[in-house]
Image (spheres, rainbow, N blue to C red):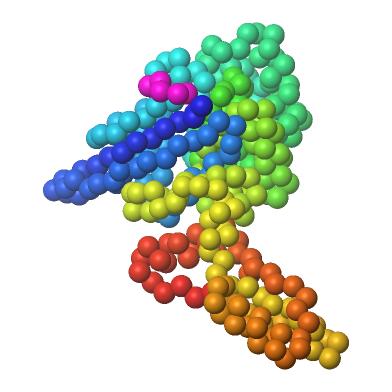
Amino acid sequence: MSILKVRDLEKSYKKGFIPKSQKVLKGVNFTIEAGKITGFLGGNGAGKTTTMKCLLGLAFPDSGIIEYFGGKPLDSEVKKKIGFLPERPYFYDYLTGEEFLKFYGKVSQSVGNKELLYRIDDLLKRVDLEHARHKQLKDYSKGMLQKIGLAQALIHKPSFVILDEPMAGLDPDGRYYLSELINETAKNGTSIFLSSHLLNDVEKLCENLVILNDGKVAYEGTTRDLIKGMSTKVKIFYLVNGEVQSKECAKGSELQKEIDGLRAEGREILSITEKTFSLEKAFIDMAMKAAGKEVSH
């Protein structure tokens, strides 16, 4: 069963002194699979924030269909199954970390008192904030607020979690704790939709990707397939008088020609490896191609 299906989503805003309609979403289509971490990428102005607002009922699309959990609309029962961490969350400064989680656990109406106390203890440990449970949020650092924000998104054991820039403002240690928690949450069956500009984190965490460009989906599929599809060159390693040498060439006919040439020279071919790409490189290449610019590898 899919957790979320988005079909033909369109949204326009009126902007300017003399308001003119500007289409932000131009027929967005994608599906989120159960139990997977899906990265949501796109440059500034691509439509990511507008899409997430529509998913959560914070903005109303002009047209299109949003279905949760096998065909349900976003009603009050569905909302109880969703967790959300916005990019700029609001925190009640004079609540302690423990009080903050207790407040949101009560609001969700999804967990009983005894289970809620267990969830608070467990999540504070997992985000490395047990030492700050009685400290007021006004005294938390930005990284600590990001951690308590993620704990809030998970406090009611949601089936689907939307995270907007969850790693923003975190040091490497904090990113490790949150990455571990996100991975563990997904392994326990919760689907996660994660938007981030930190592409190294996305590459490590996300099995699937949805990439927006100019209000449309430019890519939907696995992270592995995107990176592999960008790899157009290989390296051939071979022996010359007992020394390892290498040469780079394109896949396909050029590779076969190089192999035939080396064999004709009596060279021993040791290995052929694909040139590896990072998600960051693949994402930049995709953006450049969309803008009609030349891509160099």
Residue 199 position by quadrant = bottom right
Task: Name the residue at 73% across, 21% down.
Answer: 121
Does any portion of residue 84 appear in the rendered image?
no
- Residue 181 in the image: above or below residue 289: above
- Residue 280 in the image: above or below residue 244: above
Task: Name the residue at 65% across, 87% down.
Answer: 261
Residue lying furthest top in this view?
113
Pick the front one: 40 or 189: 189
Pick the front one: 22 or 282: 282
Where does the image place residue 90, in percent across and percent down from the top left? 49, 32
Task: Name the residue at 36% across, 65% down.
Answer: 291
Q: Total label count?
A: 0
Residue 249 position by quadrant = bottom right
Magenta stretch: dominant SS? loop
Is 91 magenta? The answer is no
Where does the image place residue 145, in percent across and percent down from the top left? 61, 36
Residue 99 position by quadrant = top right
Task: Name the residue at 53% across, 61% down.
Answer: 229
Q: Which span is picked out in magenta?
A: 69-74
Does any portion of residue 17 appear in the rendered image?
yes
Q: In the figure, is residue 177 to the left or right of 282?
A: right
Pick the front one: 52 or 166: 52
Where does the image place residue 275, in percent across and percent down from the top left? 63, 69
In the rendered image, the quadrant that contains the C terminus is bottom right
Pick the front one: 2 or 113: 2
Is 70 magenta? The answer is yes
Q: In the figure, is residue 210 to the left or right of 111?
A: left
Residue lying furthest left in this view?
18
